[in-house]
Amino acid sequence: MTITPTTSDELLSQSVDPTESKPAPKPAPAVEPLTSDSLTWKYFGDIRTGVMGIWIGAIENMYPGLGAGVTDHSSILNEPMQRVMRSVYPIMGVVYDGARAQHTGAAIRDYHRDIKGVDAQGRRYHALDPDTFYWAHATFFMLIIKLGEYFDGGLTLAEKRQLFDEHVQWYRMYGMSMRPVPKSWEDFCEYWDRVCEDELELTQAAIDILNIRIPKPWFVPMPDAVWHHMFKPALAAQRWVAAGLFEPVVREKAGLRWSEGDEVLLRLLGKVSHLAFSLVPDEIRLHPRALAGYRREQGKISGETPLIEAPWFSGPPKDRRRSGMHYVPPVSQGMKLVERAGALMHSTFSLAGSGFSPRPPRRKVA
């Protein structure tokens, strides 16, 4: 499906409910996509981002408008693994889809048009409210920053500023209002601290993420008890990582504890993992959408090659497929077996966590 990007500046700047009354959409100006020369490409598609799955899920949903939308409209508690897969593929595409990235961003934006309502405290929300939508993007940007600081030996100030500029270019792909976007890395740090201090709260959606269980998919030939026991320690490990990555004020709101000993252990695991992961091949280390992006830039596949889609079994429940809120992957896929393994590993890490998540120096993708 081809989607013409449209701008939401006029659409969303006046109201949190842009579907009430809106002018005919105008084509958004073309935005230069990020390329393999960017730092964002180096970090975002790596499987190690999955170790922060509970962190990003919880901190996103501590934003009241976002958390209310997930509570009222999402199926993540019933199908968390499938839901994560469906989200990750197009989100990766906004970074790695090259000339098609802006169309991918517009599609993601449009999935959110009907996600609106009133939360438990009587506050109206809409997923396309500019502040709400940008907060979600800011957490993906901070995913990269946290990854670099904890698991990649740190980032220089110049690298943080470069990543900030790239995250602005990345955000333009959605065709959303740029009003909430800070002007510089330093302004972003003030924005992040202010939102964490003044706006985040322990919503029901955040509580659900922090205590999430993973129902066994129907296609896994394993007893339920074995499945749950297998994931229990991994989920506990990821909650521990989330506690360490939270800012102290967010950790306090979430009711989590963290000691100096925990901090030392997390830093040590980050250093060990950085070395260990150098042995992992790119076909496993990179998300399939990222792997395809590198191959496309290297001329190993055509720019017209169909985009890598999520596995068919990650599709939404039948009763939700026509709602317009979901990316629905094709029934069949041509991914190689090893790349399917990479996709499953990436999504499993996003839900289950792991003790190691390093990144080797950028290598050419075979």
Image (tube, grey):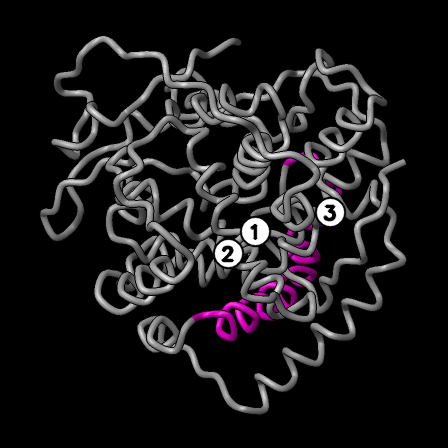
For image coordinates 58% across by 35% down, the residue present is: 95
First along the sequence among labels 1 and 3: 1
Q: Position of residue 339 (x, y in %)?
A: 80, 34
Q: Is residue 54 left or right of residue 189?
A: right
Asked if the stretch drawn in magenta spans residue 223, the answer is: yes
Q: Residue furthest front?
A: 158
Q: Position of residue 65 (x, y in %)?
A: 24, 46
- Give the residues in magenta: 218-246
Mark 3 nearby-residue class (10 Å; few <14, some 14–19, many ≥20)? some
As measured in the structure, the alpha-carbon distance from the residue carrying label 3 to the one carrying label 2 is 31 Å
Magenta stretch, main secondary structure, is: helix
Q: Amino acid at mark 2?
A: Arg
The secondary structure type at the circle numbered 3 is: helix
Classify 120 as above or below 155: above
User: Where does label 3 land, which residue?
Assistant: 345
Classify 328 as above or below 210: above
Mark 1 nearby-residue class (10 Å; few <14, some 14–19, many ≥20)? some
First along the sequence among labels 3 and 2: 2
Asked if the stretch drawn in magenta spans residue 253, the answer is: no
As measured in the structure, the alpha-carbon distance from the residue carrying label 1 to the one carrying label 3 is 15 Å
